[in-house]
Structure formats: C-alpha cells, structure tokens
Amino acid sequence: MNETQELRNRLTGIFERSGWLGYLFERAGSLSPYPYYIGAGCLVQTVWNELTGRPPMYGISDIDIVYFDDGDLGYEAENEVVEQGKRLFAELPFPVDIKNQARVHLWYPGRFGVPLSPYATLEAAIGTWPTTASSLGVRKEPDGSWRIYAPFGLEDLFRLIVRPNKTLVTESAYYAKAEKWKSRWPELAVIPWEA
C-alpha cells in the first residue's frame, strides 16, 4: 500500500470512529441530487484532535457542507438547501454552514475584497481553500464508499502543517486563520507566507 492510500485509510478510519461525524456523513447523503462534500474545518480539526489526544469535538465551531448547482444561482435556491440542512442536522451540536459553490463569485469580492471568477466545478472551489491541509472535501457515496478530494494531498494534514494555498487567500487572512488554529493546537507548524 502506498503512502497516499495509507493516509486515506487513516482519514476514513478516524471518521468512522467518530460517532457524530458518522451521523453527519449518513445524513448528508440525502442532500442529493447535488454532489456535495463535507469540507475543511470540522474534518481537519477532527484529525488534529485524534493526533494530539484531544476530545473529538475540541475546537470545532461549525460544519461546512458545499455543493454545486450552476443551474440556479439565486439566493432563494441556495436558501432552500440551507433550510433543508437545518432540519436534517438539527440534532448536531454545531451549526451547519451550507453553500452553493457555483454562486460564491457573486458575494466573495464584496465580503473579502478579492476578485473571483465563477468556479466550474465543486472540486475547483475546494482547490482554492486557504491552506493545503484544509483544501479537503469528503463524502460517502450511496454504495458506502468514501470519496475524498484533497488536491494537495493529506501529508500536511497528518504532519500538523499549516501551509498557505495562495490561489485565493490573502496573506492577512491566512495568518489570522493560522494564528487561531495555533492557539487551539500549539503542536501545529505554521509555514510562513514567504516560504
């Protein structure tokens, strides 16, 4: 077994041992017909908690679920999915943030001051997330298999390395996120922007 497959197996093993994440993955499957991913923070932080001996839910503040529907870019259509998610995940201990990645370009420049072209796919969106470790999307397929999208691999995640993905994030936003994480997981190695 190569290192990539070994890390993927470690990742899904951690998720399978997590009761609340198992519930999340099972419930998220009913968000179809859109392809979706559970992404970034809650997954990354669950792995860091496992690696550093912290409680499974330590430091997690919300759950990000992303999907892609470029057939209707209206707020109302996205809000319908958000409302469905509120009902679907009402028993979870964290708020669930559901976003249609096909419409991010409509609000991102106003919120973050960075121009953004429309994403062509859900995977293209994940590839712009702020760090190499957090550029991660995972879902359970209907047949029970795992779909993992990690464009920068899983090595930084399992080595507790925070490295900027400069595709979209600004230097100040990267450091703000890295410092917040470092305050919760002091074991993290934060790679300087200039490196």
Image: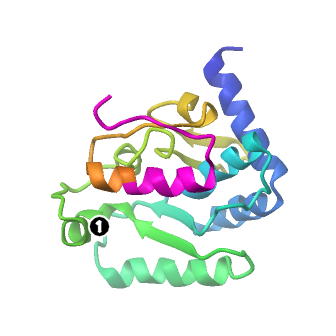
* Chain part drawn in magenta: 176-195
* Residue occupying the point 25% across, 71% down: 111
Q: Secondary structure at mark 1?
A: helix
The one of 169 and 52 positioned closer to us in this rendering? 52
Q: Residue 145, position in %: x, y?
A: 70, 42
Q: Is residue 116 left or right of residue 52?
A: left
The total of numbered circles placed on residues is: 1
* Residue occupying the point 61% across, 56% down: 184
Q: Is residue 68 left or right of residue 166?
A: right
Q: Residue 89, position in %: x, y?
A: 67, 76
For label 1, the residue is 103
Q: Amino acid at mark 1?
A: Arg
In the rendered image, the quadrant that contains the N terminus is: top right
Q: Residue 165, position in %: x, y?
A: 35, 40
Q: Judge the density around disc 1: few (<14), some (14-19), many (≥20) Cα neighbours within 10 Å.
A: many
Query: Is 42 located above or below residue 137 in the figure?
Result: below
User: How is colour applied across the structure in the image?
Assistant: rainbow
* Residue occupying the point 78% across, 40% down: 13
Kindly indicate the quadrant of the structure image that contains residue 114: bottom left
Query: Is 39 located above or below residue 107 in the figure?
Result: above
Q: Is residue 8 left or right of residue 84?
A: right
* Residue occupying the point 57% across, 81% down: 84
In the rendered image, the quadrant that contains the C terminus is: top left
